Image (tube, rainbow, N blue to C red):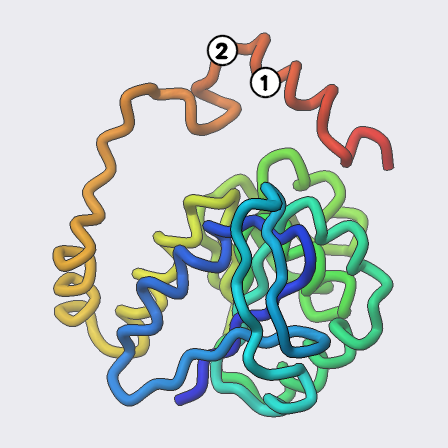
């Protein structure tokens, strides 16, 4: 099994690293970071870079595709090198997945039309414009398409997909190994729970409000 994680400039690190930490444990699987060109790509903070060892052309038919999101997603919406690879890879994938606003890239490639999908809560209206039924659920399965909500939900997506691929007990073992047992100090992780003024502040500041 080959698992390909797509990278682009200004991606959000946890979108890629969260699923990587979980799904790279699939027995006998090869996990590769891929990009338009091999090399280091910086995340949205500018302080962290991941190295894409292979180009999209080098990985034509992965079994699993993972597309992260992040501020750099906006600049990739018309990048036919990336979108074309997503379409061609999707023709043979077992699972095509995304985290956060990575679902907008899948939608721009035409892969989510008429499907249910998740994204960051600030991007749900943008996702709807592509003929997608956007949902606030944390992880959404629609056939072989698996989309996760914002950033940290990529860990949940990775675990649920690991269970489908390698079985529930193996997924539980990896959950225990990584000690994934969330006990957040605040209960403000969704717009339904967070203080209303913080929700509105982020809505006003998001790049989607300017599109």
- The image shows residue 167 at horizontal and vertical percentages of 21, 75
Are circles 1 and 2 on residues that touch, CB within 8 Å? yes
Query: Up-down: is 190 above or below 2?
Result: above
- The answer, for residue 67, to whether it is visible in the render is yes
Q: Tell me the quarter of the picture where residue 53 sits.
A: bottom right
Q: Nearer the viewer, residue 42 or 118?
A: 42
Query: Up-down: is 68 above or below 109?
Result: above
Q: Tell me the quarter of the picture where residue 125 sits.
A: top right
Counting other residues with Cα less than 10 Å from the Cα at mark 1, is it few (<14), some (14-19), or many (20 or more)?
some
According to the picture, the residue beneath numbered tag 2 turns out to be 195
- The answer, for residue 114, to whether it is visible in the render is no
Q: Nearer the viewer, residue 155 or 35?
A: 35
- The image shows residue 44 at horizontal and vertical percentages of 62, 45
According to the picture, the residue beneath numbered tag 1 turns out to be 199
Left or right, 32 with respect to 9, comes to: left
Counting other residues with Cα less than 10 Å from the Cα at mark 2, is it few (<14), some (14-19), or many (20 or more)?
few
Secondary structure at numbered mark 1: helix
Q: Can you say which quadrant of the picture contains the N terminus?
A: bottom left
Left or right, 32 with respect to 124, comes to: left
Count of numbered badges drawn on the protein? 2
Q: Can you say which quadrant of the picture contains the C terminus?
A: top right
Mark 1–mark 2 distance (CA, rounded to whole Å)? 7 Å
Q: Name the residue rendered at 55%, 57% in the picture.
A: 49
């Amino acid at each position: 099994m080959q698992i390909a994680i797509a990278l682009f400039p200004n991606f959000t690190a946890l979108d890629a690293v969260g699923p990587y930490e979980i799904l790279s444990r699939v027995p006998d699987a090869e996990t590769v970071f891929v990009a338009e060109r091999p090399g280091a790509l910086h995340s949205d903070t500018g302080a962290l870079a991941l190295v894409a060892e292979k180009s999209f052309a080098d990985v034509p038919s992965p079994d699993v595709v993972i597309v992260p999101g992040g501020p750099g997603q906006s600049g990739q919406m018309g990048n036919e090198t990336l979108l074309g690879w997503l379409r061609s890879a999707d023709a043979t994938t077992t699972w095509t997945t995304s985290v956060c606003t990575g679902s907008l890239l899948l939608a721009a490639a035409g892969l989510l039309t008429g499907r249910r999908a998740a994204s960051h809560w600030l991007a749900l209206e943008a996702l709807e414009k592509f003929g997608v039924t956007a949902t606030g659920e944390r992880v959404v399965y629609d056939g072989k398409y698996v989309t996760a909500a914002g950033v940290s939900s990529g860990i949940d997506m990775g675990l649920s997909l690991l269970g489908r691929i390698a079985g529930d007990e193996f997924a539980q073992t990896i959950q225990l190994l990584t000690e994934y047992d969330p006990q957040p100090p605040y209960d403000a992780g969704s717009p339904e729970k967070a203080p209303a003024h913080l929700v509105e502040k982020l809505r006003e500041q998001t790049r989607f409000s300017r599109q």
